[in-house]
């Protein structure tokens, strides 16, 4: 059936010219605003703690904050330096965990969810649906520097290794209770909770989903990988939640270790 209506151009129709940035009446700006506040708060706290270079280690219970793992500087406490120390001290502006922190930040910076978050909030491209963006043109991620976002898949492998390191830090602390035996304190629970949630965020990553099942031509020939891919796909639906939760748990874990290390808090022991 052919339409009898004339084309819009023939009828003299034109695109609507709206002077307002948007006609939306809801609080469309609240989401981007909270995103700016949340990400900025994390970056400010993380930078301050990385440059503090103190209160990162609780010798009595082997608590090491993830912000300082692995600790490689010459001035690191020997017991905290799992992989040994470099033969020189780091300057004040260089974090002790200089090997891991840049890659962890790049892993999150190039994350699919975080891209959407800071594109909309900081870059305003666009700030929200049906809201005019302030940029004259759109080039996507085809030019420098945004083309480097494609390195996310490689940062995933590094982040996976760092998650293993954080897991080791949390598990080894269980065997440093009183008298060097097995023990559990509130700090152990904090470290373990942080590690579990970090794994949830890391494994729910789109890159992990692709590594497991993205190149398979037939799932029927790889039932084990199909089950793993299905599990990761279910976790992937909560990737945004894990992205925000792990920012909070990283801060809370580091803060707890710092307060115990400084003597402000006493770690409550539940066992031994």
Image (cartoon, grey):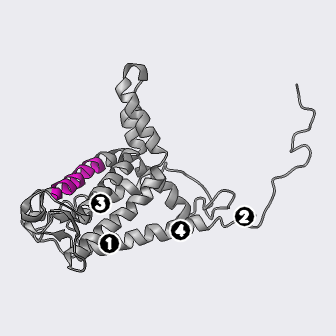
Q: Dividing the image into 4 quarters, which one contains the N terminus?
A: top right
Q: Are marks 4 and 3 in contact (CB under 8 Å)?
A: no
Between circles 4 and 1, the one closer to the viewer is: 4
x and y percentages locating residue 172 in the rendered image: 15, 55
Q: Are marks 2 and 4 in contact (CB under 8 Å)?
A: no
Chain-order first, disc 2 or disc 4: 2
**Who's the residue at 90% across and 49% down the image?**
12
What residue sits right under mark 3 in the picture? 102
- Residue 84 position by quadrant: bottom left
Q: Is residue 54 visible to us here?
A: no
Marks 1 and 2 sit apart, C-alpha to C-alpha, by: 36 Å
Secondary element at tag 1: helix
Q: Position of residue 239 (x, y in %)?
A: 45, 49
Query: Which residue has dot 1 on it?
Result: 47
Q: Earlier in the sequence, mark 1 or mark 2?
A: 2
**Res 47 visible:** yes
Q: Earlier in the sequence, mark 4 or mark 3?
A: 4
Q: Which residue is mark 2?
A: 22
Q: Secondary structure at mark 3?
A: helix
Q: Main secondary structure of the magenta part?
A: helix
Q: Quadrant of the C terminus?
A: bottom left
Closer to the chain start, of discs 1 and 3, is 1
Residue 83 appears left or right of 263:
left
**Which numbered disc covers residue 4?**
none
Eyeballing the image, is 12 above or below 1? below
Q: Marks 2 and 3, Cα distance to the nearest angstrom? A: 38 Å
Image: 1 above or below 89:
above
Q: Secondary structure at mark 2?
A: loop
Q: Secondary structure at mark 4?
A: helix
Q: Position of residue 72 (x, y in %)?
A: 14, 63
The part of the chain drawn in magenta is 158-174
């Amino acid at each position: 059936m052919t339409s009898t209506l004339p084309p819009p151009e023939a009828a003299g129709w034109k695109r609507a010219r709206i002077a307002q940035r948007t006609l939306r009446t809801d609080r469309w700006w609240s989401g981007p605003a909270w995103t700016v506040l949340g990400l900025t708060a994390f970056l400010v706290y993380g930078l301050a703690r990385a440059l503090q270079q103190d209160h990162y280690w609780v010798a009595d219970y082997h608590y090491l904050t993830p912000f300082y793992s692995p600790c490689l500087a010459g001035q690191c406490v020997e017991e905290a330096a799992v992989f040994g120390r470099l033969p020189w001290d780091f300057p004040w502006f260089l974090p002790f965990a200089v090997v891991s922190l840049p890659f962890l930040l790049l892993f999150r910076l190039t994350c699919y969810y975080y891209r959407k978050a800071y594109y909309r909030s900081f870059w305003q491209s666009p700030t929200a649906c049906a809201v005019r963006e302030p940029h004259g043109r759109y080039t996507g991620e085809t030019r420098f520097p945004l083309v480097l976002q494609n390195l996310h898949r490689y940062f995933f492998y590094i982040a996976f290794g760092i998650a293993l390191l954080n897991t080791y830090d949390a598990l080894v602390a269980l065997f440093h209770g009183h008298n060097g035996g097995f023990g559990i304190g509130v700090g152990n629970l904090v470290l373990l909770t942080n590690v579990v949630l970090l794994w949830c965020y890391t494994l729910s990553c789109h890159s992990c989903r692709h590594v497991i099942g993205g190149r398979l031509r037939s799932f029927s020939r790889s039932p084990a990988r199909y089950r793993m891919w299905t599990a990761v796909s279910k976790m992937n639906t909560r990737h945004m939640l894990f992205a925000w939760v792990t920012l909070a748990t990283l801060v809370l874990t580091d803060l707890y270790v710092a307060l115990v290390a400084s003597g402000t808090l006493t770690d409550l022991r539940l066992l031994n």
